[in-house]
Image (cartoon, rainbow, N blue to C red):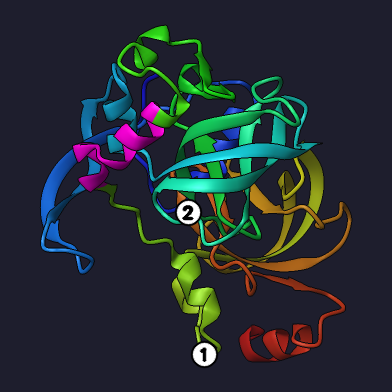
Amino acid sequence: MNFTKRKSFTIILVLCILFVGSLLLYNFNFKSVTTNKSDNKSIVISNTENSVQFNSANDLIKYADNVIVGSIVEDNEFSKTTREYTFLVEEELKGSANSSKIKVYETNNTLNLGKKYILFLESSESTYFPETSYTSLDKDAIIEVDGQKLVCKKNELLEDYKSTNDFVQKVKTSPSLRFIREKSKDIDTLSTKEDVDVFTKSDCVYHIIPTTITYENKYIKSVKVEILKSYKGEFNENWEIILPSDIEIGNEYIVFLKKEGNTLTQTTKNKSVIRKNDTNWSDFINKYEK
């Protein structure tokens, strides 16, 4: 599986691409830092132009944010091509999900309800998703667990392992556990601060009426809009605007957006949309209308 560079808005684009069945691309390079957990050094993996090939379990361990053993306990539709799987975490071999259940997003028919798996996951944060999102680094490297028997499309990944216990123990002692992917710093972290100036942090601030929905899933809508007023930034009708899923056609909103290429995404998770019936609507109008 090939991989491309990420930027702060990547989770939205990544999942949108995944939802229409395209393959994701990721690239990496390396530098060293010292961890606080031990005297050993960890290797932090950051974006580069070099592609990565997953030829062994150690390659997957190296580039995964999380390696987790667990079972699928819920299977829900996320979009026409994507499922939202709830994964019950039974054992963490790398990383910490900070939850007993996580959301894993995969194309249809990738995982099966009730089945147990070992997953090599990449995690992402988004201004649209309520919690951390996960997806497999390589769909062909998903390992199904059946007692002490392991099943994987990439049979070569399992050649050096005699059983489930053997695989788990070798993962726990793998030198590849030292590698940690450096994550981009999403501006969404500002949404936890009460005094954040969303207007200043935004590239574009518009008074809009959504006119057409071009794509939607459980959490987002990609929309075409009528611009009633621009308070900040230019506007091009060919730009894609991604807003929360509760946005409705015909209603008025003030939106705070970040621009990346031809895509506009909300600046923060909780403060980027003002609805006309919100108490702070008149406060904004009084402050910025001239």
Residue 33 lies, with reference to residue 200, above or below; the image says above
Q: Which of marks 1 and 2 is in front?
A: 1
Residue to which mark 2 is pinned: 259
Labels 1 and 2: the sequence-earlier one: 1
Numbered label tally: 2
Residue 58 lies, with reference to residue 55, above or below; the image says below
88 falls in the magenta region: no
Residue to which mark 1 is pinned: 195
Q: Is mark 2 on a helix, strand or loop?
A: strand
Quadrant in which the N terminus appears: top left
Residue 285 shown left or right of residue 26 in the figure: right
Residue 290 lies, with reference to residue 46, above or below; the image says below
175 falls in the magenta region: yes
Residue 237 or 210: which is nearer the viewer?
A: 210
Magenta-drawn segment: 166-179
Q: Is the magenta stretch mostly helix, strand or loop?
A: helix
Crowding at mark 1 (Cα within 10 Å: few <14, some 14-19, many 20+)? few
Residue 144: percent from the left, percent from the top? 57, 22
Q: What residue type is labelled 2?
A: Lys
Cα–Cα gap, marks 1 and 2: 22 Å
